[in-house]
Amino acid sequence: MLRNAVAGPVTMADPDGVPASQEISGLTAPRRAAPRERAPATNASAQVQKLLRQQAAIASFGSYALRERDLMKILAEAVRACAEGLNVPFSKICRYRAEENDLLIVAGYGWQDGLIGHVVSRADTSSPQGRAFTTAEPSIIGDLQKVTGFDLPPFYAEHGIVSIVDVIIKGSDHQPYGILEIDNDKQHDYDQHDIDFLTSFANVLAEAVSTAFRGAALQSGIDRMQALVEEKDRLLYEKNVACAAPPGPENGSGRPIDRRRRSRFE
């Protein structure tokens, strides 16, 4: 005999009006719960698409940097690709100047004209950019309005910047090149994937900058060598021209004859 069996039909309705039990030969057995609906995969699919887009952005930029020798073109492409990879409207690159101990904007995307060449901050902890530079750690601010104690230039407010992320661009000889920053005019909570993308992008950019510097130094050496060769060729040519000139008439002593001297019979 089954325990907990109940004689006669017993029905209990759930909130949807569906009987919660089924009658089986005078006994009642619990009805199996309906399988739960799976959560939509929309969020997971969007995340995968974002990661693929970011990986493609890094690969595409790396390929471009290998072909391009002009550093300014490399920086301009970097800010564009980085902004599009994170789907933000603004980005910029700041170069560190040791003499002034500041960070100078050398490339930007989405900003109004005239921003390039302006100093964004000191290279210290008084700004998010300086903090990222001095600590070599990402500086993340999801809402600038909730943060105090930072000294930011007026153009942040002019462009309505709300959230920013800064990462360091490594350099050679233990001296970082500067800072890569993304800017958004909306409040945004950046996840670890976003930070990983930005850091990886900055590392690829750092190698591109170093390669461009090495290429520029090599080209400068080639230009100097070419100038020396051209100068040597010029001097050799002038010497050959002088040696090829016909000699003037000479007397027996090897000295040129003075045609102005009169003979004794004159």
Image (cartoon, rainbow, N blue to C red):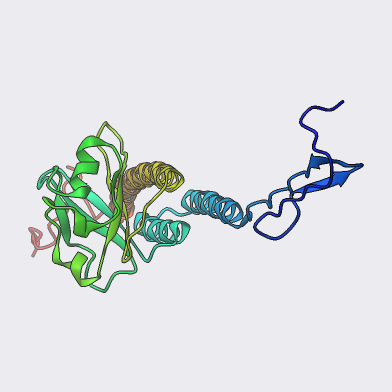
Residue 236 position in % (x across, y down)? 32, 47
Residue 176 position in % (x across, y down)? 26, 39
Of 249 and 86, which appears nearest the observer? 86
Image side of residue 23 versus residue 14, left or right: right
Q: Which corner quadrant of the image does residue 245 belong to?
A: bottom left
Image side of residue 122 versus residue 113, left or right: left
Image side of residue 209 versus residue 146, left or right: right
Residue 29 position in % (x across, y down)? 81, 40
Of 33 and 152, which appears nearest the observer? 33
Image side of residue 46 versus residue 246, left or right: right
Whether residue 251 is visible, yes or no, is no
Q: Residue at x 80, y 34 (%)?
A: 5
Whether residue 152 is visible, yes or no, is yes
Q: Residue furthest right?
A: 25
Of 72 and 177, which appears nearest the observer? 177
The N terminus, quarter of image? top right
Residue 58 drawn above or below residue 83:
above
Of 192 and 242, which appears nearest the observer? 192
Q: Residue at x 46, y 51 (%)?
A: 65
Residue 220 position in % (x across, y down)? 32, 47
Q: Residue at x 15, y 45 (%)?
A: 123
Q: Which corner quadrant of the image does residue 185 belong to?
A: bottom left
